[in-house]
Image (tube, rainbow, N blue to C red):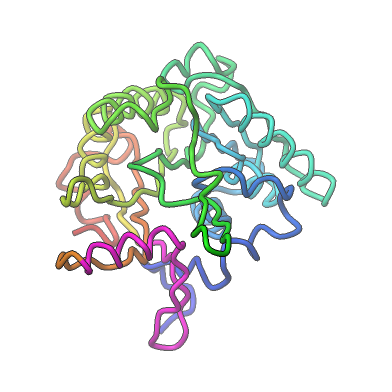
């Protein structure tokens, strides 16, 4: 089998998240509840861009997309709604440059639902890759502190206390906002540009919410066409075995469900959705033949 054969399954958790960020991000970055794995960002940026290209993350968080882009010699622009996380993304970019990153990075604090009024209008038509991850469901992330006789306490598990933050607007509100954001991103893309998202389903009231499928429909209603649907592993791959890297909270949720007689499995991957502009890809029939990993 050729070594360069494109794969739709990405082994992006060969090292755990903490070791992927160690020495590459400022220590306080762990306070954000849901961070993209650096290996996912690295793989996506290396796959869909070239050095000197412009990468955009409209929901930048602590700046994982931006940091990995500038380390790979790309330029990066991030938009982040929460001032706390925007400042942290700026700190991570500064740290990257102090460690030899050659790309230029910038963070703007603003609402991705209003991209046209937030980013410099001169970037329109220049973005090679939009790479992001939406907030979804009650966070299963955070830090655990065990106290003898008092159980555990959970910290650093909230995106924000602002009710307008997309983490708090419910599924319908999130999908509506994502439609607006993706349409704004589409207007910034260069002709052969790509919009990519990491996303996973979540459980709500005992029902599995197919957020990846919903976002495919939202993206295609926003002037984009699904081009690839890949799998980014959240578990390590050792020969023929998966090495679990699930958080305490994800494991606890599964244990409670099974104790209640509800069969449930720990999530071991994220869907990696890749869109292109409809006018670039062509008609839907031609597009379907080029989708790798799509069901």
Camera-side residue of 25 and 115:
25
- Residue 112 is inside the magenta segment: no
User: Residue drawn 49% across and 59% down?
Assistant: 151
Q: Quadrant of residue 264?
A: bottom left
Residue 270 percent coordinates (x, y): 37, 57
User: Residue drawn 46% across and 25% down?
Assistant: 188
Camera-side residue of 257 and 79:
257
Q: Quadrant of residue 259?
A: bottom left
Task: Give the vertical position of 105 relative to 183 (above or below).
Answer: below
User: Residue drawn 59% across and 36% down?
Assistant: 54
Camera-side residue of 205 and 178:
205
Camera-side residue of 121 and 136:
136
Residue found farthest to the top: 117
Where, quadrant-wise, is the C terminus in this rendering? bottom left
Please report the bounds of the magenta region as a residue range: 232-259
Task: Give the vertical position of 43 relative to 116 (above or below).
Answer: below
């Amino acid at each position: 089998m050729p070594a360069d054969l494109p794969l739709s399954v990405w082994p992006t958790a060969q090292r755990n998240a903490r070791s992927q960020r160690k020495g590459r991000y400022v220590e306080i970055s762990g306070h954000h509840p849901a961070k993209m794995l650096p290996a996912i960002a690295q793989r996506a940026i290396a796959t869909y861009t070239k050095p000197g290209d412009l990468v955009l993350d409209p929901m930048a968080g602590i700046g994982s997309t931006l940091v990995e882009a500038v380390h790979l010699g790309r330029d990066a622009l991030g938009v982040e709604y929460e001032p706390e996380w925007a400042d942290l993304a700026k700190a991570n970019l500064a740290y990257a440059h102090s460690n030899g990153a050659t790309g230029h990075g910038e963070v703007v604090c603003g609402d991705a639902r209003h991209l046209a009024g937030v980013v410099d209008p001169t970037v329109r038509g220049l973005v090679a890759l939009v790479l992001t991850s939406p907030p979804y469901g009650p966070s299963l992330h955070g830090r655990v502190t065990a106290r003898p006789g008092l159980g555990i306490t959970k910290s650093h598990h909230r995106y924000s206390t602002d009710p307008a933050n997309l983490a708090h607007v419910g599924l319908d509100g999130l999908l509506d906002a994502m439609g607006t954001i993706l349409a704004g991103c589409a207007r910034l893309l260069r002709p052969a540009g790509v919009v990519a998202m990491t996303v996973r389903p979540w459980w709500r009231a005992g029902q599995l919410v197919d957020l990846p499928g919903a976002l495919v429909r939202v993206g295609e209603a926003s002037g984009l066409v699904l081009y690839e649907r890949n799998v980014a592993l959240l578990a390590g791959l050792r020969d023929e075995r998966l090495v679990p890297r699930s958080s305490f909270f994800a494991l606890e949720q599964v244990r409670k469900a099974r104790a209640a007689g509800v069969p449930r499995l720990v999530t071991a991957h994220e869907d990696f959705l890749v869109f292109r502009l409809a006018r670039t890809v062509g008609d839907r029939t031609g597009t379907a033949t080029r989708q790798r990993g799509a069901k």
